[in-house]
Amino acid sequence: MQRRSMWTNLRFVVALILAKLAGFFSRRLGRGGGTTLPGRLALRICPEVLEILASQLSDGVVLITGTNGKTTTTKMVHTVLQAAGYQVAYNVSGANLTSGVASTLLAAASWSGKLRQDMGLFETDERAFPRVLAATRPRVVVVTNFFRDQLDRYGEVDHTVRLVHQALTRLGPQSRVLLNADDPLVAGLAEGLSAQVLFFGQEAEGAGPREGVVHPLQQVMDAHFCPHCGSPLKYDQVYYGHMGRYHCPQCGARRPDPAVALLTGIPSAPPAPVEDQDGLPLTIRTPEGLLRIQLRLPGSYNAYNALAAVAAAYVLGVPAPLIPEALGAMRSAFGRMEEIQLAGRRTLMILVKNPTGFNEVLASLLQRRTAKVLVIAINDLTADGEDVSWLWDVDFEALAASGQAARVVASGLRAYDMAVRLKYAGLDESRLEVVPDLGAALRRGLALAEELTGPAREGLPAPRAVAAAAGGPDGTLHPGRGGGPQAGPEAPGPRVEPGALFPMDERLYVLPTYTAMLALRHQLEEQKLVGRFWQET
Amino acid sequence: MAEERPLRVAHLYPDLMNLYGDRGNVIALRRRLEWHGIPYELVGVAPGDAVDLRSFDLIFFGGGQDREQRLVCQDFGCRFPALSQTRAENIRRAAAEGVAILAVCGGYQLLGRYYRTAEGEMMPGLEVLDAWTEGGSERLIGDVVAEASPALVPTAPRPTLVGFENHSGRTFLGPKAAPLARVLVGAGNNGQDGTEGAFQGSVFGTYLHGSLLPKNPWFADLLIERALAHKTGSMVRLQPLDDRLEAQAHEAAIANAMRKRGRAARA
């Protein structure tokens, strides 16, 4: 706080007071919880506000960036740090631009500008990363992965990687950079850094040979080029997306050996079903020994998130025995996947934001082998990505062919884009409805679920047989129609012949993009159906 | 005899040139061929594959980043003894024989005379479009609405194309290529002359992702008609399909682009 001009001090005080007032009124008015507005305002008045506040964090700052898994990884690291007794300021609701990070610290600061926390933990959007890094001089940086996501905001993946790399070169040798060894784009960031690099990744030794295993729903490959010489990479194993064990036949570069390694747990088959409360058993090797974690979150991507979180906890010096207990007690981060009761109906809300994430979500839904009512809400605002062409990289063909989509309501600002995508994926138009208004789509989804499964009731879904893929010529379903000669739910693989029978799922599935989810949450809060999300933790 | 074989569609470099949902164009072509009742065969062509592209009726060529474009250029220069010509010569022949070609973004840039990147690197093109591309420092990103050019659709009302552009290259057209469309919303070829895309004979290039063909079914069918013309040697008119959902998506995309442009203009 020293060595600042009086003028800067004055601007800081004004910025702080106005930001705190803005946050207070924003919360009072129920407008988005003041997660970004105070920071935007304060940065206008005093651009140094982030530096000034972050400099008080005596235990340093941890930044987590990358395309997928930022929010969950951040929440995991936070849980572990809390268990270790740290006072941590962190951006809880995914407000991950510079303004969101600033808002977090402004809200945490007292009216005199003092922080009681001694550590900062911020998930940081790739675009905001260079500025947040310069302002917070992090002690630890975690980079999870680089996938196609909201490409229109950044240009292309290569450009994002360059931005992040340039920022990382500014870190000194006292900083630690934790990189995903299995993602060649992330591993390539290690080159030319002064900071100490530590790799995390999957180690096949404990998992048995899985030669050439490709996730059946993964068709999107973002990186198949050597970060050193640019030649095409050879994959000995593919874990998911472009993550795997790779080498470059041209220059001999290969996947770095991970210091923190996942030995078992990432299933080569699709991820475990959501109901499976036992979740994923993970064994993670750190330089200090093995950790066994029973993760209660579904999906192979959460195994990677846990791995990144363990790597961060390790370099931050958290005692190893604390880690499995803290991670084992976690539930999903805000909105990523949560179950709520809507008008008495179990409703699963799952954030979708890019092809890889959407494919993972579809894979875990298809694992349930039930006929479902889905509401898919696609917006194209800045936070969603303005280019909706990514929908064509999602494997909706698998959903259409599975016979598990009893009805789909397409909603959001790009409801018709979604509907056309499903039509071309082969979903019968009689199963498809377009309701652009989000609230109306939710009501329609509930009505369809009621129509197909009967009134909502608590407890487990009753398996009412429905001809999910073979409705009548008018598109109506025939509850109770007996099983035909075709394969039943036991049919292998995600693709099942038309005519297969699935029990009707009583849950409603809502798959929104980011701003569609915020808007839905807002409507639900107004109707007092769910709690205010920014009051979490 | 020639009528017996299925319509042959080639997807050029599907692993390299597949940016921004380009596979949606191939999905749309496949579905619409099915719905029109036209038997077809789809073949992916990777670098080094000794395939004679003159044996196809329709070629799709998607977008990629500079790095992928560089690898594709290497393949253009690749000589195939079985054909006794290079890939570039083979594609030029195919274009001259009336094979319909659609190229999007990065693929479009490589159909021209050259693409010079912002760093000054020269990538020679296929020269099947009288066009050239200069790298720019600022990316042109956003929704596009464009009206078909009179050269393509002589009489009004002319249909519109909707899509999303995301490119730093600026493409300029020479006298032999005609613009595909006139920009109503967005930047188009270069942000200066109001043109979007280009065509020359049955070779079409555009900057529109989106994906382009599902939301512009009239254009998808135009390409299929050109491909059928190549196969049968005579003009074919396709029967219209039930495109109500596509039409609604098209209209919604126009309204959406207008709304966003209005917002940008106010900001």
Image (cartoon, coloured by chain):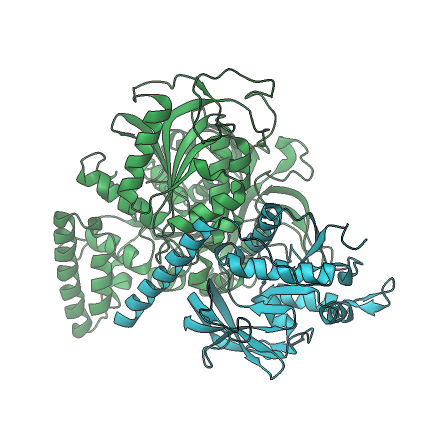
Chain colours: A green, B cyan
Q: Quadrant of the N terminus of chain A?
A: bottom left
Residue A227 in the image: state x and y as whole percent: 61, 60
Query: What residue is at 42 percent from the left and 42 percent from the top?
Result: A313
Q: Quadrant of the C terminus of chain A?
A: top left
Residue A302 vertical position relative to residue A52 in the rendered view, above or below: above
Residue A129 in the image: state x and y as whole percent: 40, 60
Residue A513 vertical position relative to residue A362 in the rendered view, above or below: below
Foreground pick, A328 / A340: A340
Residue B220 in the image: state x and y as whole percent: 56, 58
Relative placement, left or right, of A435 versus A483 is: left
Relative placement, left or right, of B33 versus A146 is: right
| Residue farthest to the bottom, as pictured | B175
Query: What residue is at 47 percent from the left and 81 percent from the top?
Result: B193
Residue B249 vertical position relative to residue A471 in the rendered view, above or below: below
Query: What residue is at 46 percent from the left and 25 percent from the top?
Result: A370
Query: What residue is at 39 percent from the left and 16 percent from the top?
Result: A462
Where is residue A312, by image quadrant?
Answer: top left
Relative placement, left or right, of A313 versus B45 is: left
Residue B115 in the image: state x and y as whole percent: 61, 76
Question: Can residue A171 be seen here?
Answer: no
Tally of numbered discs: 0
Question: Can residue A175 be seen here?
Answer: yes
Foreground pick, A469 / A236: A469
